[in-house]
Amino acid sequence: MDFGISFMLAAAKTTSTVSNTANVVIKKTGLASWIVQGGLMMIPIIVASVVALAIIIERMLYLRRARIDTNKFMDKIKRVLGANRVMEALVICENTPGPIANLVRAGIGGREWKLDENIDSLVKKGKLKGVIVVGIYNNAKRIAEYTPSRTRSGSAKGKGGELSAYAKYIVQEVKPFIDKRYRTLKGRKYTGIMGSSLGGLASFYILAWYPKIFSRAAVISPSFWWDDKKVLKDVSSFRFPRDVKIYIDGGWKEDSKGPTMIRHMRKVYTALRKAGLKDIQNIMYYEDPRGRHNEASWARRGKWPVLHLFGRSSSIIRKIRLVRIPAKIGVGDRGDLFAQVYFSCGMRMTKFGKGFTVKNKNLLEIDAGGKITGLRPGLVFVTYRYRKKLLTTTIKVLKKSISHIDIYMNIYTSHPVKQLYVIFKKPGKNGPGKKIALKMITRYHGVYRYSGKKLGFVRMLFVDEKGRKSHTRNGRLLAPIASFSRNRRISIKVHMRN
């Protein structure tokens, strides 16, 4: 996967390199005589030799600069990808020189949208007359060229800010070239721009900057987080024509630290609605409950943006489905409740906030943004109304929070002790940690019960009343790491030593 893929975006730029060559002094007259005798044929041979030497020196210098600690680099990439932070992994590859980083970046982004298959399917079904797609390969400057400002913080600090020049290149060079070379309908009504990730961010800005060139845009999994969410400030100043068409979508599983992309998308969508743009006529907004930040998710949704922008779409509703994330909710928990509207043409639209009514308000609360909060245990009736259609569902509020866990620990010692303590610490964190006394069943057996919120991974060290620490039978310090993320029982045998 890449830092955003765009259509109608600029091609890779070429750069020229200059290499210095040293003067060669020939000391033996025999060699000079041999060169002179070679005549004109020696000139291309000498030139080729100098060029080859320059290339060898340049490659040696490049490989010298590209030296990295491969194991350290790969461990960092594995850790970041393991946390589903794909964007951060791509930034690391971008900032790391050398062929290994390039290969890893290609591996992360080595999949495709299947845009041609999706378009062919729409054409065969009679939903699309056909479009000309101009997909232009991005280059090493894609982060700068796809972003409207230079970011001041985060993993991409100091990067970006060349989108205005990039957009000018598209409008003044790329589009005229395509219009001259192919049978296009040149008017703004027939011209759109589409991109994902940073390409989605770029598409949104280009549509706003050039309303006389583009009348529609697909903004896929957009990087609205860029430069401290600058787009949330800029969107209020954008003036879109009344015939504009915008498709926005993203997934609930794109971020490892919660649905931050969805939160940003909702704010942009709300601002567009306040500016007077209408659902279906102007905007098609969709949240994919299982969508991730990859080409597989974009390919699965690939028909819908093309259908909204250029196809024969329909506003006839086939069904409405209510979605709750997470699926379960307990007292004190917060979640999201929203509606998915399915149209007869195959497209889907997400609605949140307005239209929901809670019958048992003392059990469950829902705010204007679609956030629900469990107040008391019980069965709750929720209704949703959209276009004269009424849908009713039930939500069971559990007695305990879904983040609540119970862990039982049994600690056995090889020697009698008066009191055992456990010291909890987060792995990698400094400090004394939290010391808790165990309940002593016998002088050889202590128990501890944890009942509360999930803590993730926790390191445990056991000490007795004399300060002796837990060891293994072989004399190694015993400080195991345990997962406090689910209900479980833990049994450990320790040897107390100084």
Image (cartoon, rainbow, N blue to C red):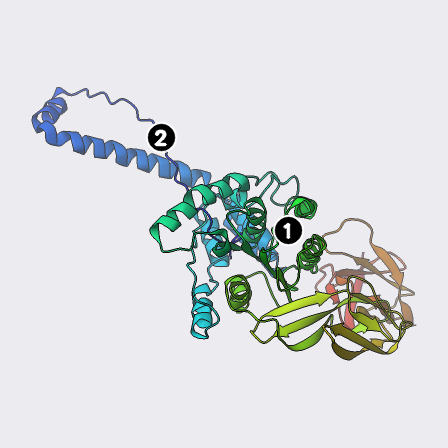
**Residue 17 location in percent, x, y?**
37, 33
Answer few, some or many: residues within 10 Å of disc 1's Cα (few below 14, many 20 plus, some between 14 and 19). Answer: many
Amino acid type indicated by mark 2: Val
Judge depth for marks 1 and 2 and give the one in front: 1
In the picture shown, does residue 352 fall above or below 97? below
Question: What residue sits right under mark 1 in the picture?
Answer: 224
Mark number for residue 314?
none
Of the residues under marks 1 and 2, which one precedes in the sequence? Answer: 2
Residue 11 visible from this viewpoint: no
- Looking at the picture, tell me which residue is in the foreground, 19 or 233: 233
- Looking at the picture, tell me which residue is in the foreground, 480 or 373: 373
Q: Tell whether 336 sits left or right of 435.
A: left
Q: Quadrant of the C terminus?
A: bottom right
In the picture shown, does residue 112 fall above or below 191? below
Question: What residue sits right under mark 2 in the picture?
Answer: 18
Answer few, some or many: residues within 10 Å of disc 2's Cα (few below 14, many 20 plus, some between 14 and 19). Answer: few
**Residue 121 location in percent, x, y?**
45, 72
- Looking at the picture, tell me which residue is in the foreground, 251 or 194: 194
